[in-house]
Amino acid sequence: MFSFFKKKSPSSASALDPAPVAETASPTRANWLARLQSGLRKTGTSISTVFTGTQIDEALYEELEAALLMADAGMPATQFVLDELKLRVKQLKASDPAAVKSLLMDVLTELLTPLEKPLLIGQQMPTVIMVAGVNGAGKTTSIGKLTRHLADGGASVLLAAADTFRAAAREQLGVWADRNQVEIISQAGADPASVCFDAVNAGKARAKDVVLIDTAGRLPTQLHLMEELKKIRRVVQKADASAPHEVLLVIDGNTGQNALAQVRAFDDALQLTGLIVTKLDGTAKGGVLAAIARERPLPVYFIGVGEKLEDLETFSAREFAQALLG
């Protein structure tokens, strides 16, 4: 979940006062965990079948290695998990497969824990959040869902329709603005950076808590579009020298190691501050978060398992590890 800060009155001695962590109007975490486990069933089944035998031997570790690699955990994370698991099994003299599976859950939880951080809103007014991602990753839909989370937490949100590259993207974001009853800055045929400049200034003038910028979907290999992203960042800084305060990448959980390649490319270009991982429903590649945790441990602010508003939720390392193991 995100932490929301409210400004005190001008007479207050402190500029910011931490308010209680905002609760969203999402279903209970128990229901969410059930949906997450259902979404990751393919990944979880492939890993859990390793522990159906009765012996803890080298064959089991080889099967586990294959299952983790098939889940797109990647070799560095897979080797780390295996080494840690073998060490703990030896230290605790574990011989029961169920006990070893429990130790594996602990190892995965600890590996993923650095990704579990809250999205902070309100330390800057407005908090400017720039969102990037390749076409088809669910970027604009995730922005709509994130807008709902922020609004439910008491934050006022202004959307910036800076995706002028894709046909109907502006209209799609407009639908989300109407659905969430928030304002939107949108200009037909305008330069994306200009839209962002106007949105940040409008956010200041209208005392918004958050300005959420939708950028054009692109592949890291589309160099001219990546340069446009860098231009947007520079122009946003002209409107607010401290902005953007968050640069988020939306990645499709079904793309496995390709998602890690996207994280590398966008992080190198934009200095990412966090991730939103979508479409984890029905994927056999859920281990990619382990790969990200090992190589580029960026905060995963939200994960999604479907298209409904309630299908985007905050990331919990323990919950994800539980779902990964079925």
Image: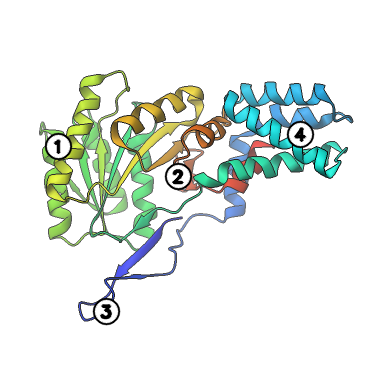
Task: Name the residue located 70 percent from the left edge and 31 percent from the top edge.
Answer: 82
Q: Is residue 33 above or below residue 216?
A: below
Q: Is residue 19 left or right of residue 53?
A: left
SS category of the residue bearing label 1: helix
Determine the residue located farthest toward the bottom in the rendered image.
Answer: 11
User: Residue 166 appears in which quarter of the rendering?
Assistant: top left
Secondary structure at numbered mark 2: loop
Residue density around tag 4, few if under 14, some if 14–19, many if 20 or more, within 10 Å: some
Q: Amino acid at mark 2?
A: Pro
Q: CA distance from mark 2 to mark 4?
A: 28 Å
Give amino acid for label 4.
Lys
Gap in Å between the C-alphas at discs 1 and 2? 26 Å
Counting residues from the start of the chain, the first of labels 3 and 1 encountered is 3
Q: Give the Cα distance between marks 1 and 4.
A: 52 Å
Spot occupied by residue 232 in the image (x, y as percentages of width and height): 18, 36
Give residue 299's mark.
2
Instruction: Measuring from the top left, give residue 71's x and y in whole percent.
Output: 61, 26
Instruction: Tell me which amino acid carries mark 1.
Output: Ala
Q: In percent of the image, x 29 and y 75: which residue is there?
A: 14
| Front of the two marks 1 and 4 | 4
Above or below for 245 versus 75? below
Q: Which residue is mark 3?
A: 13
Return the residue nearer the eye: 296 or 305: 296
